[in-house]
């Protein structure tokens, strides 16, 4: 909650920790956070690519992958009020056809 916000969800040139190749010890925490982020992509399509990349390492996450999760969480903190909002309303579908 008190972290510094990031301006982008992923880094072009990642600055990974020195032990980024080591397996992340608490795999259930990684899976829990990334699984929750999957639900967030419904209203935040801007993070879909990053979440997809993190999901590909759920079976064997490393310390570097967890650093990516932390960066994404920092980005979300800085953009907490961004996203799509859905409000109940009537659904009217209008279609037009040009036969030429």
Image (spheres, rainbow, N blue to C red):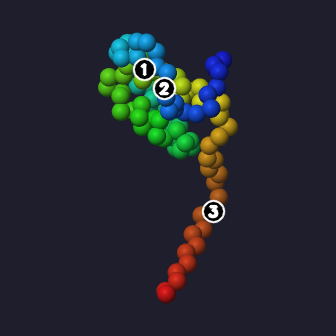
**Which of labels 2 and 1 is toward the front?**
2
Looking at the image, which is closer to me, 76 or 95?
76
Q: Is residue 36 above or below residue 63?
A: below
Please tell me the numbered disc located at residue 90. 3
Please tell me the numbered disc located at residue 14. 2
Q: Residue at x 36, y 17 (%)?
A: 21
Q: Rounded to the nearest whole Å, what is the CA distance between mark 1 and mark 3?
A: 46 Å
**Which of labels 1 and 3 is toward the front?**
1
Disc 2 residue crowd, few under 14, some 14–19, many 20+, Cα 10 Å: few
Mark 2 or mark 3, which has the lower sequence index? 2
Mark 1 or mark 3, which has the lower sequence index? 1
Q: Position of residue 12 (x, y in %)?
A: 50, 33
Q: Rounded to the nearest whole Å, what is the CA distance between mark 2 and mark 1?
A: 9 Å
Q: From this viewpoint, is residue 30 visible? A: no
Q: Position of residue 63 (x, y in %)?
A: 41, 17
User: Which of the 4 quarters of the picture holds residue 91?
Assistant: bottom right
């Amino acid at each position: 909650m008190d972290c510094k916000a990031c301006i982008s969800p992923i880094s072009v040139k990642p600055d990974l920790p020195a032990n980024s190749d080591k397996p992340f010890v608490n795999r259930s925490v990684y899976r829990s956070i990334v699984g929750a982020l999957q639900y967030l992509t419904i209203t935040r399509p801007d993070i879909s690519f990053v979440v997809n990349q993190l999901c590909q390492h759920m079976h064997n996450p490393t310390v570097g992958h967890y650093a990516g999760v932390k960066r994404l969480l920092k980005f979300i903190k800085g953009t907490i009020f961004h996203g799509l909002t859905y409000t109940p309303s009537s659904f009217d579908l209008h279609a037009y056809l040009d036969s030429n």
